[in-house]
Image: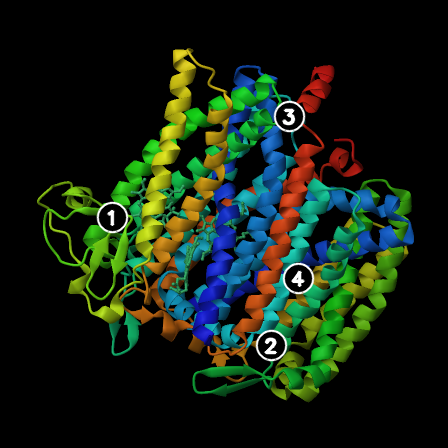
Amino acid sequence: MSIEQLGITVLWSFLYGYLIVASIDFGAGFYAYYGRISGTETIIGPVISRYLSPVWEVTNVFLVFFFVGIVGFFPETAHYYGTALLIPGSIALLLLAIRGSFYAFANYGVKKNSFYLLAYGTTGLLIPAALSTVFTISEGGFLAVRGNEVLLLMEELFYSSYSWAVVLLALSSVLFISSTFLTYYAARAQDARALEQMRRFALWGGIPTIISSLFVFVALRNHNLEHFQRALDIWWMFGLSLVSFVFAVWLIWKRKSYGIAFVIVMLQFAFAFYGYGLSHLPYLLYPYLTLYGGVTNPAMGRALVIAFVAGFVLLVPSLVLLLRLFLFNARYVKGDL
Amino acid sequence: MGTVDWSRGLTEMTLAFHILFATIGVGVPVFISVAEWMGIKKKDVHYSLMARRWARGFVITVAVGVVTGTCIGLQLSLLWPEFMRVAGNVVSLPLFLETFAFFFEAIFLGIYLYTWNRFSNPYIHWLLTIPIIIGSSGSALFITTVNAFMNTPQGFTIESGKLTNIDPLAAMFNPATPSKVAHVLSTAYLTAAFLLAMIAAFAMIRGRKDDYYRKSIRLNMTAGLILALVTIGVGDMAARFLAEEQPEKLAAAEWHFETGSRAPLVVGGRLNPETQEIAGAIEIPWALSLLATHHPDGMVVGLNDFPKDEWPPLYVHYLFDSMVGIGFYLLAVPILFLAMLWLKRWNAYNRWMLGGILAGGPLSFLAIELGWFYAEVGRQPWIIRGYLRVSDAATTNTHVSIAFWLFAGLYAVLGIVCLFVLVRLFHNKPAELELETHRIIL
Ligand code: HDD
Ligand code: HEM
Ligand code: HEM
């Protein structure tokens, strides 16, 4: 594997990690808020807070890792994306900032404040919508490049059906991933009422997820035929994604092995996400920037890869420790600790 | 104001806000660790309670540190794309390492906060503070090397407009790195000592009498004495580094125009920029030469050796003098306090002493801001000294002013709500109350 392929694989994997952990977090925020206004807070609230509290900061680092890493491995991206995304990027940052800090305020500081929870719940849906537009922009057609200037064509973006399809997919995926995870977590906590509620969300959430992903395919065909064709070349990845989806929903429907069901949901998104990424290559930004044109120099590339391997050796055991203490520790999950 | 000015303004604002929380993030874990350890070792609930209370406030400030840090991390690409294009090629290694340090810290902080009573051996819980300290101090180290690179860039050559011969390690360990990293770390620890002492002093001024507060002040003032000494020593090292590698920054801070030996140190005063005459200042003969070279005959380069369009703004003189002044204040307070404590002739916890300690908190944060503004404004007009001017590195996007106001609103809200939450947290639960409930448990 060349440095640029290695680099993008590493970064894409971290983005996938973010997709999963952040979806759980974003969706949980939404469900927590829903619980408060629908008066069912006491059912799902404790489950959500027991899972979220120890891990929220870790979630954020996944994202930071991605955007620091991409500028490191592919400095040219700073020029294009950095210039174009000033306003959407700032808005996403604003939402992330409100969300992160208000979570801490509500959780460690003043309890029982509906306003904090509202901020936390709504940003959970707005952030994925904002972040997902970066994928849309990467398909090309939304930037105007004049010399050193890079302009984002906001109007094109707003009237594009592809852009809305992606937003829809992002939102439904967040709710789906989150509810399947919380179903599993509630089952482990042996909290029957929370389990029932989350299971219902998971089953209902599956429907828009699958519809909007089909919608994305159709819209992609109209928007970027080249990418669509490449996606068809690896149709089996998307096929496997669909199979995983059906299997996972079936398990949850049958009230069987919620843990395995969640792992299969992770697989479903892995197939789709890596399939999307693979067919997107070699472009980082259609049609201006490819993997090979944008990569850093070999010396830095090597240094980053070495740093990455060393960092990984440090991180994996620590993450395993975190998960063992909080996710796979039955007594903690039940709230006995 | 043009795009460059707005970008500058936004960068300044974000960093000036972030550094308050980042400093707490670097400094306070060290004291949490020390207090928890002393609590276990001496079997003293006071210290254990200190660790818990500090940790509780700490998470809230960490949250704001994390979100503002995320802002500055992305803003570097959004506002300075051309800078990041170069930096991406030459110094992305420490930026990348910084995220690993955060990761490490975030994981163990999550574990630390939720395992107070989970291990039968209390030292295991205490051990968790070590990776937190490594992570936060490590991230300060890495980010500071990036800033050091901006001041004394090396590790690459430019041939016909292209970067070649890139050496990531040389870029990271540039001449500015040792003094900068040491100064940033020692001042973060020093500031944390004064912040925590300030809280205890405030409670005592308000009439609280428990031994808890006395122990807290004693612990923090002892640490403060050592750290203030180290800070002044390292500050001197930073000044000597400047004299050697970045003389225009030191000369601007000292209003030193003509290169020469036996240079005097100028404190305060007013400058006439046309004639370069200084009025109303205290001049200490030879002192600048002594400071910069450790020799009264030492040569100190003056500003007139540089083209005028490469001079930093001369108001940095006041920033530098105020920072140094605060440095000596932060040394005087612990000396006085510990002397009174040791001589036992006077009450070391009298109102005046407590007031002096109280003032040390905001003053040390002020010194952090002054130091950074001096270091950053003193680098002007360069973003990468000698290679890239600030005006050539800014974004071409014309909407920066909108982003500026968005973030101004955000920081105002975060700052106010954070203060409000912290005050509520400690006001509703004074240490005495917690001690009582603890003793019932014991
Ligand atoms: C509590 C905070 C604090 C205190 C008491 C001091 N400093 Fe400081 N100083 C900083 C906080 C700081 C800082 C915020 O950490 C800076 C900004 C950038 C940096 O590297 O450190 C800094 C920068 C800085 C620089 C510029 C370094 C550069 O740009 O490369 C010099 C020369 C000094 N300091 C010197 C001193 C001296 C001689 C002090 C003696 C009393 C002193 N500082 C006290
Ligand atoms: C956290 C403490 C810091 C503070 C308070 C601070 C303050 C400032 C200020 C006042 C400026 C504007 C200077 C001017 O335009 O006159 C500035 C600019 C800048 N700083 Fe810093 N800085 C800090 C740390 C850093 C670090 C660690 C980095 C690099 C990793 C950095 C990168 C920049 C950049 C890219 C600019 C814009 C270009 C420029 O105006 O020179 N800063 N900062
Ligand atoms: C241009 C300059 C800077 C950038 C790009 C930056 C970036 C960041 C980011 C991305 C975070 C959030 C990390 C997370 O998600 O956990 C953060 C937090 C933090 N930063 Fe900064 N930072 C800068 C300046 C500084 C400086 C100058 C210091 C120290 C002297 C510092 C120390 C910290 C610390 C200790 C945290 C605390 C959050 C925690 O405890 O996890 N940063 N910074």
Q: How many marks?
A: 4
Question: Badge 2 local density, few (<14 within 10 Å), some, or many (20+)?
Answer: some
Q: Position of residue B225 (x, y in %)?
A: 38, 28
State left or right for residue B276 relative to residue B57.
left
Q: CA distance from mark 4 to mark 3?
A: 37 Å
Chain of the residue where label 1 is placed in the rendered structure: B
Percent coordinates x, y for residue B321 in the rendering: 32, 47
Q: Please, which chain is the residue tagged with disc 3 on?
A: B
Residue B85 versus residue B148: which sits nearer the camera? B148
Q: Which residue is mark 3?
A: B119
Same-chain status of marks 3 and 1: yes
Residue drawn at 55 percent across, 33 percent down: B128
To which residue does mark 1 refer?
B281
Q: Which residue is mark 2?
A: A279
Q: Which of the chains bears the disc numbered 4?
A: A
The relative height of residue A154 versus residue B116 in the rendered view (above or below) is below
Side of A317 where A32 appears, left or right: right
- The residue lying furthest to the front in this view is B280
Badge 4: residue crowd in 10 Å (few <14, some 14–19, many ≥20)? many
Q: Is the residue at mark 1 from the same chain as the one at mark 4?
A: no
Label 3 with label 1: CB-CB less than 8 Å: no
- Closer mark to the observer between disc 2 and disc 4: 4
Of callouts 2 and 4, the N-terminal one:
4
Say few, some or many: other residues with alpha carbon within 10 Å of mark 3 (under 14 / 14 to 19 / 20 or more). Answer: few
